[in-house]
Image (cartoon, grey):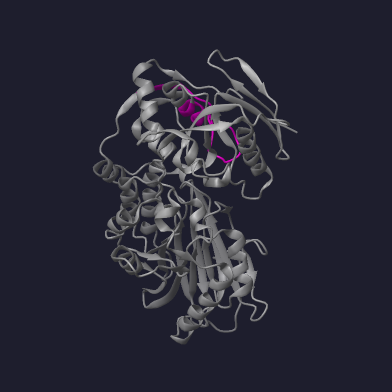
Amino acid sequence: MVSSVSNTPIAQPAQPKTTKTSIFYVNDVHSNLTNIEKLKNASDEFDSFTPSEKTDKLKFSVGDIGVGRELQFSKVAVAYQNLTGVMASAGGNHEFDLNKNDLVDVLKDAKYKFLGLNVNIPQDTEINRKLRKDIIQSYVQEQNGTKYGVIGLMPFDFAFHLSDPAEYKDFEILSIEKTIPLIQEQVDDFKKQGIDKIIILSHIGSENDQKLVQSVEGIDVIMGGHDHKLIKDIKDGKNLFYSKKTGEPTIITQAGKDGNYFGVLNLEFNDKGVITKAQNNVTNTEDYPRSLLMRDIINKILGKPKELGTIKAIPKHKHTLIDENPSADFVLDAEKSELGVDMVLINSANFRSSLEPGILTDRDLKILTPFDNKVWIIKLTEKEVVEALKVGAKSLVKDDNTPGIIQCSGLRYTISKSGELKAASLVDKDNKEIPIDINNPNTFKTYTVATDDFIAKGGNKYFENKEDSVTTKFNFDKNKLVEDYMKKHPEPVEISTEKRITFVD
């Protein structure tokens, strides 16, 4: 059995050779620049701590460290990982928000391994051949003479989350059924080389991580990501599992999302490469100051932020997929004002942080909504609007809360905590509510709706691909519209929670 307290000795008649290992890990940082600055200081603290006994220190990231189509933000993510000494990272889905050429450009600067065992890349183009060289399946990390076998996994629902799925339509992500034997083969190969400490960097979600534990022998640690679980400590049956065949333990980790947390996993292996002690410390990044060095690097890559105005007040809030987001209310109201549309509909996942009182900069907007999706105006029938709200409402009863409720402007709606749409109203320019019959929505009545190209093409499946209903395509993100709005409204902004989305039992 594994002891969950790393400094608790286990009585033994003799003292066989042991290996102590400490792993700093992050996942799903999503280009949150504020937290990237804080994570740099957390990483420095990890580096500066000197254990009382010889300890191998490792650093890994597990995908989606960067996010969005803007090349410079992905360069920041790479710079952060280089600066902190990350040894390897799994390929998430958001690294592939970039087009192929930009991804190659970004990865050429990476000093760490970029891993994806379960992707087949056809070698029919020069750019694909370059990416095949950049994305490796596994490697051996040697530290203080100890060898660790490291394998990376990309998400099985890869295409579902991409900003532009067509860009990578020729990539084949193998199913979990096809991936499992490949992992076992690689683990067995490591074992034949005498490498008995196996780590998986897994951007496939915690449910799939547990399937790996049940199906593959010889994995010591699965460092997870993708579904944004916050897994603290070590708990039997939750993130500590034992092989039915050998009785050897496997530990699963994951540190939430947006860089709000990081983890340090402390391990002790016996002379057979089996974990005998473990401690999983997950820490709130909020407790750390922002690194001036990291901020300077960010400013060199992105340029200094531009001041847009002042936020006088805003309710304190955190980004989730199933709550009304006051920061989103402000952004979408500005977008609606600038475009003069009936309503604005955006998925909750498009927002990754929250605004705060004080000077508002373009950098703050980019941290809030980093994807750089292009603004489209489309025509939606009343029925299509209702169906989109229903899709979002069902997120309340899903374990992972995906795809999330719809954030909106020009619309108010009510949903039950059981995931049902209960009421909806259009809000006109005079702030008058016009009820929508959600039980018998009009299939002929249409609205002009501002959204983005990801949602308009059917992303997250709120509605079918609406490219044939586009009236206007803009080559900019909604953040530009907020900037334009702020120029016309320079007075300090007071953002309130309007309860445009109401939750009932």
- Considering the image in quadrants, where does the N terminus appear? bottom right
Considering only vertical position in the picture, is 158 above or below 503?
A: below
Considering only vertical position in the picture, is 230 above or below 300?
A: below
Considering only vertical position in the picture, is 368 above or below 121?
A: above
Q: Position of residue 477 (x, y in %)?
A: 39, 35
Foreground residue, 450 or 212? 450
Residue found 58% across the figure and 20% down from its top: 427
- Considering the image in quadrants, where does the C terminus appear? top right
Q: Is residue 314 magenta?
A: yes
- Segment colored magenta: 309-332
Q: Position of residue 28 (x, y in %)?
A: 47, 52
Residue found 44% across the figure and 71% down from its top: 150
Q: Position of residue 164 (x, y in %)?
A: 43, 50
As drawn, which residue projects farthest toward the top?
430
**Left of 132 or right of it: where is 330?**
right
Q: Position of residue 95 (x, y in %)?
A: 40, 54
Residue found 67% across the figure and 42% down from its top: 394
Q: Does residue 298 appear in this view?
A: yes
Residue found 26% across the figure and 35% down from its top: 304
**Left of 242 or right of it: where is 102?**
left
Foreground residue, 279 or 459? 459
Quadrant of the rendered image containing residue 171: bottom left
